[in-house]
Image (spheres, helix red, strand yellow):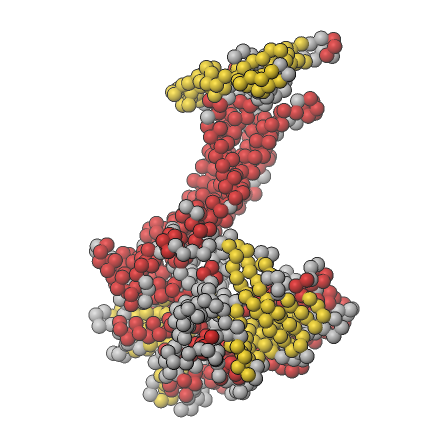
Amino acid sequence: MIESSHISVRNLSVHFPLGRQLFGKPPVVRAVDDVSLEIPKGSFFGLVGESGSGKTTLGRAILRAAPITSGQIFYRDDEVEYDLGDIHKEQLKDYRPRAQLIFQDPYAALSPRMTVRDIIAEPLEVMGITNTREETDDRVRKIASKCRLNLEHLRRFPHAFSGGQRQRISIARALVCNPRFVVADESVAALDVSIQADILNLLESLRGELQNTFLFISHDLSVVAHICDTVAVMYLGTLVESAPTRSLFSNPGHPYTKALLSAIPSLDPDVRGKAQKLEGEIPSPVTPPSGCKFHTRCPVVQQRCRSEIPQWRELSTGHSVACHFAEP
Amino acid sequence: MTLLTVEKLDLRFDTDEGRITAVDDVSFTLDAGEVLGLVGESGSGKSVTAKSLMQLNPSNAVYGSGSEIYLELERNVVDVLSLQSARELEIVRGGAVSMIFQEPMASFAPAITIGNQMVEQLLIHTALSKKKAADLSVEMLERVGISDAGKRFYQYAFELSGGMRQRAMIAMALSTKPKVLIADEPTTALDVTIQAQVLDLMKDLVAEFGMAILFITHDLSVIAQTADRVAVMYLGRILETGTVRQVIQTPSHPYTQGLLNSLPKLAAIDEPLTPIAGDIPSPLERPPGCVFHTRCPKAKPGVCDQSIPDLFAMGSGQAAACFALTQDWPSAN
Amino acid sequence: MDLLSRSKQKVTDQSLKEAYFTASQTQLVRARFKKNRAAMVAGWVLTLMILAGFFSEFLSPYAPTMAGRDKQYENGPPQMPKFWDENGFSLQPFIYGTKRERSIKTNFRWVITVDREDRRYVRLFVKGWKYSYIDLNWDLPGDAFDVNFKALTFSTHLFGVDKGGIHLFGTDASGKDIYSRTLRAIFTSLKCGALGVFIAFVLALIIGGISGYYGGWIDSTLQMITDAIRTVPPLPLFMALAAFLPQEWSAEAVFFVISSILGLIGWPTLARRIRTHLLSERSQEYVLAAELCGASSSHIIRRHLLPSFTSYIIVDLMITFPYMVRLETALSFIGLGLIDPVSSLGSMMQNVSKADILLNYQWYFIPVLFFIAFVLAFVFVGDGLRDAADPYTDARK
């Protein structure tokens, strides 16, 4: 494993059985299929993909909230090193405070029956990080003010808050145990534009302050471009491209990344309809296409793509792509 | 030629918690062959405005006394708000006005085939025979780029993917040749690559059918790509209106400026995002005066929190409702 | 305090707003329930009826059983206390004395005539028949199980008359006071429903809870059993049971058996609701959030699932209750449950099903009105609670 990596994912596959069948094996959803990934320490790592790309499942697998069908995930910080596929109960208990999740929906993620103070304090109490109520309150107040929450509002219940405020509560809860690694799963997707920018700035400033690693999962390339330093692109459960943000956006290697970039509607009314459009639909992850999974929609598809799975290869330093024909 | 006129539309909802203002003094016109974008965040009243064009708002909606909506057709002028019976309402529900929704699954009946639904709608609104209606439906499905249209005609909505469903929805909405199409966040639930396809399709269809579109979205870039004119709404009021170039390239209302600044732009990755300060107030706590003054960087106490600014014409069709644009606003401080 | 309405008006009072923001789930539910006028009225009606049921002995001048019959006033019409008539005004309400006669003139039917000169005054807190609040007198099958224990015995009643009898709702064929019987019937139906709901609820909580929390094959098996029980047609089952119930069993034993059967066939619907609720609550993101903190199952059940549950359970019970009462009534009505000498709403409704009564003794219908009011009150309160318990019905529109 690479020394500077916080998370190393090796040939990870996560398959879910689809329903139950009386006879024979049920069909499986190949949510994540043979993915390898290194998330450098202290980075803001973006994971981009459309629906069904497996980005959420990958994030959950790293948090041990989704089953690992095959492959390995390693976690390493200054103190410990865990093989998450083969972690026992005691280690898992120690792993929980190190890796936390910020949810997408600021309404569903907060229990409507607990005060904001109790919601934020729950991880501390469950994990046994603090011993006295004063200590807990102290930690809660510290993180709440970092997340720009009004301390007088801690007594309130979530129903008193708007979407943006709820998302700040959600963030405070995820960060209260001082995790070294945080997965933010579509954490701004449900918010209005004017609020979204505020939450993104908050995440960025928190990262600067707490020095932790973020895995930022999103479908929105422009958001990822702004906040992440490294970006990986997923399509139908596989990784198609991974590169430092600047390199990815200025010089995308994979035809899917190119199409994704040009599909974003431009804010300039004078640049209309100049995008290179992808044909067809996203195939089902139950019956993914053979060879390169993108070949059914790829504008530069060749005979070879239909049968041969492309190798993961490095185009330039840190810029890797899974396409037979990509050139640096 | 003006097709649709909305005049001083006022709409409140009677709820347990009291009267909630959803739309406040909204006026706009829509010309034939024009795409008007209605942009706003949650609670801006953009969807409610659109639904009142078809009288689709729930029964606890109360229209203000001065509210008027006129639909100018070739032969007559329809006063939309005076329509009562289901028969009279046919003209704005699928006749001269059609609507496509964010979630097409919700607008197709789950137990009726797509074909049957399209034919049924055509039988209500046109004088076509059943056979002709079926032919036209298949033709429309083909036109919106659905492969195997003949086969899809006999399928149910759940058998189609999200993008296909949205195309079928558009085919259905356009089959009666409406004069006005209301598109309520038609691409928000779609993936980016599929969204691009659907936006392209809609652009082609406007050119082909020459109808007017009221395009409702929260996404300024989608508006930039589709609309001719834009109206920016916030808490039920129109704060700025103008051509799409004016509003996006030279926004004059602080809210429009803030919205554009807070948008992450691919062309300028390194520029910091500037959010609009504060939160959108709850509809129960509607600010007095200018609705935006609680978050406005230019807000002046005693002015903006006291009276409501009118739309101030900036010339060449752009107008914004902001005191800072008027003559007597002291430029210093 | 009426949190909702006041906070939603133009609130200038910060403390009131804060009260709304810091209001817990229960407080919000209560506030929302209070705003529902129909449910509030139904709630009061229900409370009054339950209280009347509980204190039925105190409120009724005569025992609702054969012991309390008025031989001189069989099939007698309701007597309304009056304050004045053609003979003058009286501060104390009075009724008239009656005479009963049968002759060739009356076709040999007993006919009751009112003697308007014979005033009988209504008195409060009169001494009458004895009753005990704790009265364990179970004549269960087998002598060893018989219990006979009385405590808190009183003989004071709210009202009575100085001589003869007062029958506010009239009397039935054997002279039993319908007013007293109605009060007792409400109590019997309440007891029967409560016992039925309790048995159904305990079974449902265990079975639905296990099914919903563990899922997988346990869930499938339990669901299959539940479905099997739901397919048992209740009517033939009751017919069969009625045939098996020994005739010599006391009213209490029959009552107990009937209630238990109500519970035993009532649980599947409730179990299914509990399971569905658990399944949906378990997949809530805040439960996953707790799991990601490493919270144990017991912590999740205690902190998240149970609290989310109680309001739903109360609502469910409230909604199930009238069904139980109705089922008991239906059974008694077709003669399978509690029959005449026992006062239950069903057995009293059974009396109405004769043409003779319809034509001559319409006051037999008074208990039916009470039954309708009783069930409606329960349904309104249940609906009101259900609407109030869902915190985001309006907040997330």
Q: Residue furthest front?
A: B328
Task: Look at the picture and state if A12 lies above or below C254.
Answer: below
Q: How many marks?
A: 0
- One can see residue A166 in this view: yes
Which residue is found at the position 60% from the left and 78% from the top?
B35
Work out whether residue C54 or residue A84 is closer to the camera in this orientation and state it: C54
Left or right position of A229 against C364: left
> x, y percentage for residue C14?
37, 56
Left or right position of C113 against A60: right
Question: Quadrant of the image for the N terminus of chain A?
Answer: bottom left
Give the quadrant of residue B73. Answer: bottom right
> x, y percentage for residue C317?
47, 41
> x, y percentage for residue B5?
64, 72
> x, y percentage for residue C72?
60, 11
Which residue is found at the position 40% from the left and 56% from the top?
C12
Question: Quadrant of the image for the C terminus of chain A?
Answer: bottom left
Work out whether residue C241 or residue A65 is closer to the camera in this orientation and state it: A65
Give the quadrant of residue A57. Answer: bottom left
Which residue is found at the position 56% from the left and 67% from the top?
B25
Which residue is found at the position 63% from the left and 76% from the top?
B30
Work out whether residue A176 or residue C290 is closer to the camera in this orientation and state it: A176
Give the quadrant of residue B109. Answer: bottom right
Q: Residue furthest bottom?
A: A328
Task: Look at the picture and state if C391 lies above or below A257.
Answer: above
Task: Look at the picture and state if B271 lies above or below C261.
Answer: below
- One can see residue C63 in this view: no
Task: Look at the picture and state if C188 lies above or below B184.
Answer: above
Work out whether residue A200 or residue A56 is closer to the camera in this orientation and state it: A200
